Image (cartoon, helix red, strand yellow):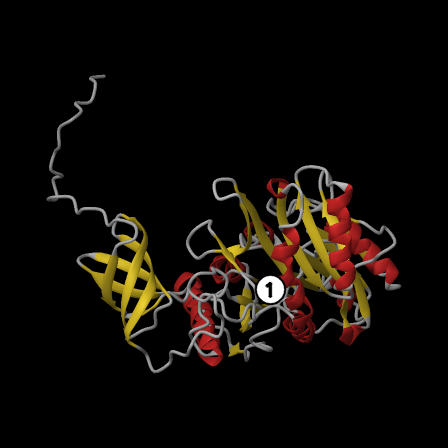
Amino acid sequence: MAKPVRGLRFQPSGGSRAAQIPVGKKQRLTIERLANDGRGIAFLEGRTWFVAGALAGEEVEARVLGAHGKVVEARTERVFSASDLRRPAPCAHAGRCGGCSVQHLPHDEQLALKQRMLAEQLSRVAGVEPEAWAAPLSGPEFGYRRRARVAVRWDAKAKKLEVGFRAAGSQDIVAIDECPVLVQPLQPIMSRLPAMLQRLSKPQALGHVELFSGSAIAVLLRHMAPLSAADLEILQAFCAFHEAQLWLHGEGEPQPVDPDQTLGYRLEPWNLQLAYRPGDFVQVNAGVNEAMVAQALEWLAPQADERVLDLFCGLGNFALPLAQNVREVVAVEGVATMVARAAENAASNNLHNTRFFQADLSQPLSDAEWAREGFSAVLLDPPRDGAFEVVRKLASLSAKRLVYVSCNPATLARDTVELVRQGYRLKRAGILDMFPQTAHVEAMALFEAS
């Protein structure tokens, strides 16, 4: 093969190649509409611009974050002509912190945006609309987040410790002294955390910090080197002042400094207590989580003599309330430690009609022992990748009713195509406002066999 000739420029057959737009360039734009992720869309000189912090109908100045071919990603730096819908951002860190991307939009408009996103995915990908739309499940728009991961990084050049949340569109860390979406018990911890961490002797060995508020408050520190006795004393004094448990994550699994301490959360309507350890998956919005479980039970309508399957069961968030209503619950999860924790949660709540199994649910359902008897109903709550391999075999389980809880409307719509092919009808669907101030959409759908 001949060597390529270097140092020469050739004109593409379609004409001259457009110059790439440099990062940091500012551009005045008119926003045509909103994208599904809440960013404004503008068109200029053959390129499509996605602009964070902009609303439809606005004229803005946008700073380029990155450009790929004819797609430009940018953020709003200045608003020349504001939409009537725009409200002042409630958070002082808006536009820098990457956490709450649509807080400039009133909450009711955020719900409408999420509803449109779900409807568009179901219509465009699956070609269906539910027979009935459910009202959005929502709660307070602030003070809802009971779990947060705080980024910690030692800047060797500046010789300082950075503590906060990731910036929008980058790996930079924005210093945060107050976060309006955190639950109130975590606010004073968040505000005093940076000063405490800066007192530790080996800041370069610190990883992240995780905060959790449930049946107790907990602070977990990820560290890549052993902590000195003096550092441990600082951490313990900080947690004692805030009446919080201290958990450490060095080698192995996270562990509480006091092994007698327990951590978890309650599902109050069902008088259930679920054990939790930092690192486990848990819904961050306690109020919407309870409303979600209640709606799932209502839609699934479990009967006392039925056998029900719960896929991607986690800690038993759905399985345990279901077990109070049916003859038997079979719950399946991919992570072995979560399976063990869910089984312990069932036992501690005196629920003995549950069985828990570990299985790779990204693969097709095999002839597992737990699947042989079939089920009256199925509930599944998969990760963002969805559950395509699972839903391909659902008809073989003879389930007449299926509730699908989704954290990604795109994969829900994709899986809906397969469920319709198997003879299921989409009876109801609606959004779950688990993350107010963000464009993240959670949804619930009810399918029934024809």
Please tell me which residue is depicted at 45% across the width and 67% down the height of the picture: 94
**In the image: residue 426, left or right of residue 42:** right
Residue 201 placement (x, y as % from top left)? 67, 42
* Quarter of the image where one finds residue 427: bottom right
Which residue lies at the image location 62% right of the left edge and 71% below the top edge? 144
**At which x and y percent is residue 383?**
58, 55
**Which residue occupies the foreground of this view, 283 or 158?**
158
Q: Which residue is mark 1?
A: 405
Q: Secondary structure at mark 1?
A: strand
Q: Badge 1, how many Cα within 10 Å: few under 14, some, many 20+? A: many
Residue 92 in the image: above or below residue 21: below
Q: In the visual, does 352 lie left or right of 100? A: right
Whether 421 is drawn above or below 10: the answer is below
Is residue 131 at all visible to an observer of this figure? yes
Quadrant housing the C terminus: bottom right
Q: Tell me: residue 231, above or below residue 93.
A: above
Say what amino acid the circle numbered 1 marks: Val
Residue nearest the viewer, comparing 157 with 448: 157
Tell me: 274 left or right of 19: right
Q: Position of residue 268 (x, y in %)?
A: 77, 74
